[in-house]
Amino acid sequence: MMEGIQLRNMREPDIAAVFAIQREQYGDGFIEPDHVLSARLAAFPQTAWVAADDAGICAYLVGYPSVVGQVTPLGGIFAAHEHPDTMYLHDLAVARRATGSGVAGALIRHAWRTGIGMGVHCSSLVSVQDSQAFWRRHGYGELGLMDERQQEHLATYGQAANYMVRTLD
């Protein structure tokens, strides 16, 4: 698996390919405006990655160092935290042509290593589109601790969204 696929940091010219993957994989309600991704990339370039094969970008993962229990609303800008304790994985998608290649797991593990290098001790995310089983296989479990504001942020992802966390070792 992963033969011929390279991981690297995302760059501004990659955004068009990222949106092509989003349109392929997400419902209309989950596609965020391109200026939002550009702002996230500018704020946290070290925590946005792409995977490329011979045909170009085939997967991506965008995250940032955050605080457990803080949910970035859909379409929201990533906020810097003075004392982050989690690598928040906001958006992961794999092009159909790379499904089953192991690229999703490789991107996730890369994000974990980056988080550990930044001094965080866990990873968190919002699971959408019935992806809870996928995230459970990667060690995440649901965490229902949010105050009213964080529950409102979570609700921007729809009723089936879950906030999930795992410890990094």
Image (cartoon, rainbow, N blue to C red):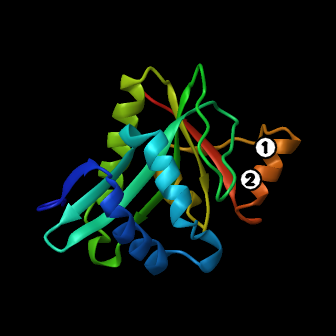
Residue 41: image location, x then y, percent = 44, 48
Q: Is residue 80 above or below residue 103?
A: above
Disc 2 residue crowd, few under 14, some 14–19, many 20+, Cα 10 Å? many
From the image, tell me which residue sits under label 2.
Answer: 154
| Residue drawn at 58 percent across, 66 percent down | 32
Taking depth in this image into account, of 45 and 86 the one nearest to the observer is 45
Give the residue type that dot 1 points to. Answer: Gln
From the image, tell me which residue sits under label 1.
Answer: 150
Disc 1 residue crowd, few under 14, some 14–19, many 20+, Cα 10 Å? some
Mark 1: which secondary structure? helix
Q: In this view, does 154 lie above or below 118?
A: below
The number of numbered badges drawn on the structure is: 2
| Residue drawn at 64 percent across, 32 percent down | 68
User: Do the residues under discs 2 and 1 have CB atoms within 8 angstroms?
Assistant: yes
Give the residue type that dot 2 points to. Answer: Leu
Mark 2: which secondary structure? helix
Q: Is residue 114 left or right of residue 4?
A: right
Residue 92: image location, x then y, percent = 45, 58
Residue 112: image location, x then y, percent = 39, 36
Taking depth in this image into account, of 125 and 38 the one nearest to the observer is 38
Residue 73 shows in the view: yes
Q: Is residue 119 left or right of residue 49?
A: right
Q: Is residue 147 above or below residue 121?
A: below
Quadrant for the C terminus, please.
Answer: top left
Residue 25: image location, x then y, percent = 47, 76
